Image: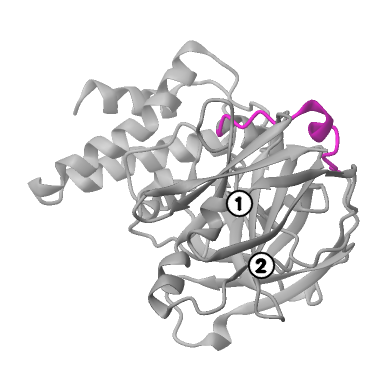
């Protein structure tokens, strides 16, 4: 028996009063090591992974550090900071953490409690955090896109790595459950992020563009909970609840006029207008255009890959918002609208817009605008 395993046994034998969860986890770790040592030599790597998972526990107990540390709950500022997205202070003050929501429609039969933790809603962009807690401690939640063989790093559990999700769940003595959330905010796409907190709370960070175009206030969150190996959809527990989000902050129109659109005309693109609005969080740009009469199908197909990009003083495109929201859509009259969302910054008196093929990275020239 190794010195490492001796230490775990000593921990379990010491006449000190330890929290039950700590003793349980140390015991589980020891059993895991013994079980894996009896298996094929091909699984030595797995043994090292289990040992690594309990090293932190052994060190904590050895030095006498308190084990019942408070759980740090993840919020939007953590989300922005981890991605080095330094949102303006005026936008940070708009984060709301007291959210009005209804109960789940079938709350009594639910295995998971869902709650809106906080949100940031500036009319254009919406960011919000949903927390999910199992009603029974025997369950461990993973998102719908994860599988038991995936690396545990995908769950972004602080300080945990080097094993699969299934191995980590077994070490914790937990049964895996898929838990999914979906909120329709009207936009063409949404970004999802996930992490599992120390106390077993699953956290979903959802962001996207408010495609409704108005300050919608009531939203519906659809939830679904199900075991990993289901035989039919009947095993899925589907539910929903409504919650309230109020758009805050201001929206200002910046007045710019086009002064040179020759580069667009040379491609057969007629740029009708460029609308720029500014909020506390971002700069929202809409390029309105149509194709010239008589333009060939080949030229139209090529132009479909051309994007409008606002350049900064350094000649590079401005920084996109965190969820990189941008798209092109056809309007009812057959013209087009391309949307770009950029991080908040001070715009110059004269703007340069580059026409660039998004796949080939080829530049087709620039367009100029000047502030009125």
364 lies left or right of 162: right
Return the residue nearer the eye: 362 or 35. Answer: 362
Q: Which residues are magenta?
A: 83-97
Residue 94 is inside the magenta segment:
yes
Q: What is the quadrant of the C terminus in the image?
A: top right
Tag 1 or tag 2, which sits nearer the N-term?
2
Element marked by disc 2: strand
Residue in the picture at 49% in, 42% down: 156
Instruction: Give the percent coordinates (x, y) of residue 236.
Output: 58, 80
Give the answer, above or below, for where 236 lies relative to 77: below
Q: What is the quadrant of the N terminus in the image?
A: top left
Q: How many marks?
A: 2
Instruction: Give the percent coordinates (x, y) of residue 5.
Output: 28, 28
Distance (Cα) linking label 2 and label 1:
42 Å
37 lies left or right of 49: left
58 lies left or right of 223: left
Residue at the farthest left position: 41
Instruction: Give the percent coordinates (x, y) of residue 24.
Output: 48, 40
Badge number at residue 182: 2
Residue 18 is inside the magenta segment:
no
Instruction: Give the percent coordinates (x, y) of residue 249.
Output: 89, 42
Binning the other alpha carbons within 10 Å of mark 2 as few (below 14), some (14 to 19) or many (20 upward) gives: some
Residue in the picture at 18% in, 40% down: 45
Q: Is residue 75 visible?
A: no
Element marked by disc 1: loop
Return the residue nearer the eye: 330 or 246. Answer: 330
The quarter holding residue 216 reads bottom right
Binning the other alpha carbons within 10 Å of mark 1 as few (below 14), some (14 to 19) or many (20 upward) gives: some
Badge number at residue 261: 1
Residue at the farthest top position: 63
Q: In this figure, which colouring scheme has been used for the structure?
A: one colour
């Amino acid at each position: 028996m190794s010195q490492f395993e001796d230490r775990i046994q000593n921990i379990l034998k010491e006449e000190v009063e330890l929290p039950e969860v700590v003793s349980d986890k140390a015991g589980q770790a020891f059993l895991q090591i013994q079980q894996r040592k009896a298996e094929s030599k091909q699984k030595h790597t797995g043994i090292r992974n289990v040992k690594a998972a309990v090293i932190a526990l052994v060190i904590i107990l050895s030095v006498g550090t308190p084990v019942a540390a408070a759980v740090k709950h993840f919020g939007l500022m953590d989300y922005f900071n981890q991605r080095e997205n330094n949102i303006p202070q005026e936008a940070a003050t708009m984060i709301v953490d007291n959210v009005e929501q209804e109960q789940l429609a079938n709350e009594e039969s639910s295995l998971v409690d869902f709650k809106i933790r906080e949100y940031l809603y500036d009319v254009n962009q919406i960011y919000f955090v949903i927390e999910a807690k199992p009603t029974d401690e025997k369950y461990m939640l993973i998102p719908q896109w994860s599988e038991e063989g995936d690396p545990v790093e995908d769950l972004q559990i602080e300080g945990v790595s080097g094993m699969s999700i299934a191995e980590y769940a077994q070490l914790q003595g937990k049964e895996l459950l898929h838990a999914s959330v979906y909120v329709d905010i009207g936009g063409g796409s949404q970004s999802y992020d996930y992490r599992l907190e120390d106390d077993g709370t699953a956290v979903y960070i959802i962001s996207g563009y408010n495609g409704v175009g108005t300050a919608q206030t009531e939203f519906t969150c659809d939830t679904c909970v199900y075991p990993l190996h289901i035989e039919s959809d009947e095993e899925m527990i589907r539910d929903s609840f409504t919650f309230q989000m109020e758009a805050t902050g201001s929206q200002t129109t910046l007045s710019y006029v086009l002064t040179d659109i020759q580069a667009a005309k040379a491609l057969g693109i007629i740029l009708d207008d460029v609308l720029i609005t500014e909020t506390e969080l971002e700069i929202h740009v809409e390029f309105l255009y149509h194709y010239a009469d008589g333009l060939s199908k080949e030229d139209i197909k090529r132009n479909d890959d051309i994007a409008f990009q606002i350049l900064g003083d350094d000649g590079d495109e401005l920084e996109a918002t965190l969820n990189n929201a941008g798209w092109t859509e056809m309007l009812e009259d057959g013209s087009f609208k391309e949307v770009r969302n950029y991080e908040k910054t001070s715009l110059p008196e004269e703007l340069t817009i580059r026409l660039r093929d998004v796949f080939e990275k080829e530049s087709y020239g620039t367009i100029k605008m000047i502030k009125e």
